[in-house]
Amino acid sequence: MRVEIDEDRCKGHGTCWALSPEVFELTDDGYAVTLVDPVPAEFEGSADEAVRNCPERAITAS
Ligand code: F3S
């Protein structure tokens, strides 16, 4: 599993980081970046939660 953040859509809500801190981090500006690529199997569940709960639908998984 890979996750990608659409920088144009991310508004810095931080839900991704709250749900899956092993996979997402917030920059000093408050926008999301990914920490791991691909996502290790043990973090796929939380990463999927982040994908589904981003208010801006800024994260895509493949
Ligand atoms: Fe951005 Fe969505 Fe995370 S808006 S900070 S990718 S919850």
Image: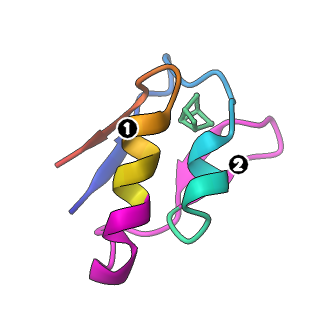
Viewer-nearest of labels 1 and 2?
A: 1
Kindly identify the residue that appears in the image at 52 percent across and 65 percent down.
35
| Helix, strand or loop under label 2 | strand
User: Position of 24 compared to 40: left or right?
Assistant: right
Quick one: SS at disc 1?
helix
Q: Is residue 34 above or below residue 5?
A: below
Task: Quarter of the image for the N terminus: give it.
Answer: bottom left
29 in relation to 33, above or below:
above
Residue at image position (69%, 29%) is 12
Q: Amino acid at mark 2?
A: Leu
Find residue 26 and name its label: 2
Residue 56 percent coordinates (x, y): 49, 19
Q: Is residue 20 above or below residue 6?
A: below
Q: Where's residue 45, x and y in %?
A: 34, 65
Side of 47 where 10 appears, left or right: right
Q: Which residues are magenta?
A: 24-46
45 in relation to 50, above or below? below
**Cα distance in 3D space between marks 1 and 2:** 18 Å
Q: Is mark 2 within 8 Å of ligand 1?
A: yes
> Residue at (37%, 38%) from the top-left corner?
52
Alpha-carbon neighbours of circle 2 within 10 Å: few (<14), some, or many (≥20)?
Answer: some
Say if mark 1 contacts mark 2, CB within 8 Å: no
Q: Which mark is residue 34?
A: none
Query: Residue placed at 41% from the left, 24% from the top?
Result: 57
Residue kind at label 1, given as amino acid type:
Arg
Q: Looking at the image, which is closer to me, 55 or 59?
A: 55
Q: Residue furthest left?
A: 62
Of label 1 and label 2, which has the lower sequence position? 2
- State left or right for residue 42 relative to residue 36: left
- Near mark 1 (Cα within 10 A), the count class, few <14, some 14-19 or many ≥20, is some
For residue 14, side relative to residue 4 (left or right): right
Q: Which residue is mark 1?
A: 52
